[in-house]
């Protein structure tokens, strides 16, 4: 009799262990076959969620059972979710229900216009570029501007993190906060001492950035040179402004490797060969260093600059027209030797 009772008890423990292990594996055991990212839109249905996550799972049926048990079929948060090795069904379901998505990194570069930037950025967001443009146009108009292009000064070159579900307003708010943080009392004081408007500062900063190629060590020298030209009433004659004028006409589809004489008369308010003064706005998104370079421009007597073929990416500076002619001729010869047209 006792032997029978012991056998029954043993069988109960075995059964409990068996079903307990099945329960644990179903709810908490590793069910990830491979790692990856799943995108779940706001308007997704339960089947779409299942279909999206299934390629990463060992057992998609067990996931569906747990998901229904925990109410994922009726409640979820849209987002970009990282499916990590070692995670069980409960972890995955809870992650999606709570909206614990993984941010994407965005590189804001020296985009010529905001439409270029938006086109790149929205490849990593749920919304399309048209939606972003329309909403940012609305924000610009609320601020008294014409369109999204007038918001260029709020952005700085850098790498940022955003969620896939970021809205245009959330996106812009991050940069607007950064813009206001950048313009400290000290910088505002330098702005006032410069005698330039903020729009002029950003326009010059964009020229400085393009002329320097983003190299910080020449920025203040270049800024001093262009301020000398501006204050003497000379045309700035910056090649990047001509390139920008041409790019705007072609929607940035025809890259210009070399500015030729025929390009200098391109009709555009941004063309500083055709127009005196500072352009009406920046020719690209700038970095913080280039703005600071304008605010802290080097006090020099330079009027001319020319690319230095002996130091790629750097320039020769001079106040002498004769010396500049020699420098320019050397650079032209170098371009011809490299067959750059």
Image (cartoon, rainbow, N blue to C red):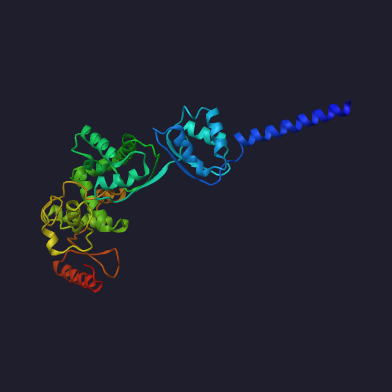
Residue occupying image coordinates x 32% and y 36% = 173
Image position, residue 273 (x, y; %): 12, 57
Along the viewing direction, whichever of 292 and 261 lies nearer the viewer: 261
- Where is residue 197, by image quadrant? top left
Residue occupying image coordinates x 37% and y 37% = 166
> In screen coordinates, is 256 left or right of 60?
left
- Where is residue 186, by image quadrant? top left
Q: Report the number of numbered marks.
A: 0
Image position, residue 329 (x, y; %): 18, 71
Does residue 7 sit above or below 326 in this rendering? Answer: above
Residue occupying image coordinates x 63% and y 37% = 25
Does residue 282 sit above or below 217 in this rendering? Answer: above
Image position, residue 137 (x, y; %): 23, 37
Image position, residue 201 (x, y; %): 22, 47
Residue occupying image coordinates x 72% and y 33% = 17
Image quadrant occupied by the C terminus: bottom left
Image quadrant occupied by the N terminus: top right
Along the viewing direction, whichever of 187 and 25 lies nearer the viewer: 25
Along the viewing direction, whichever of 126 and 281 lies nearer the viewer: 126
Does residue 278 sit above or below 51 in this rendering? Answer: below
């Amino acid at each position: 009799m006792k032997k029978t009772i012991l056998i029954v008890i043993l069988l109960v423990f075995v059964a409990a262990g068996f079903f307990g292990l099945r329960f644990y594996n179903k709810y908490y055991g590793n069910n990830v076959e491979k790692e990856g990212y799943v995108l779940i839109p706001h308007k997704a249905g339960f089947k779409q969620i299942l279909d999206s996550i299934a390629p990463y799972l060992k057992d998609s049926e067990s996931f569906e059972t747990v998901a229904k048990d925990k109410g994922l079929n009726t409640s979820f948060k849209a987002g970009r979710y990282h499916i990590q090795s070692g995670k069980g069904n409960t972890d995955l379901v809870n992650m999606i229900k709570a909206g614990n998505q993984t941010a994407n990194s965005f590189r804001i570069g020296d985009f010529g216009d905001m439409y270029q930037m938006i086109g790149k950025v929205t490849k990593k967001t749920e919304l399309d570029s048209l939606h972003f443009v329309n909403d940012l146009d609305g924000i610009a108009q609320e601020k008294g501007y014409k369109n999204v292009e007038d918001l260029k000064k709020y952005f700085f070159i850098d790498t940022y993190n955003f969620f896939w579900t970021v809205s245009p307003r959330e996106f812009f708010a991050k940069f607007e906060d950064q813009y206001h943080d950048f313009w400290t009392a000290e910088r505002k004081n330098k702005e006032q001492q410069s005698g330039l408007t903020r729009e002029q500062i950003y326009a010059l900063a964009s020229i400085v950035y393009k002329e320097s190629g983003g190299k910080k060590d020449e920025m203040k020298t270049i800024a001093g040179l262009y301020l000398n030209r501006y204050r003497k009433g000379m045309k700035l004659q910056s090649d990047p402004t001509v390139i920008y004028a041409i790019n705007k006409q072609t929607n940035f589809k025809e890259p210009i490797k070399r500015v030729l004489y025929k390009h200098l008369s391109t009709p555009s308010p941004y063309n500083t060969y055709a127009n005196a003064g500072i352009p009406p706005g920046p020719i690209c998104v700038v970095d913080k260093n280039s703005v600071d370079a304008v605010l802290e421009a080097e006090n020099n007597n330079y009027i001319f600059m020319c690319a230095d073929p002996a130091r790629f990416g750097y320039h020769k500076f001079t106040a002498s027209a004769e010396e500049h002619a020699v420098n320019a001729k050397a650079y032209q010869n170098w371009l011809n030797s490299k067959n750059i047209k």
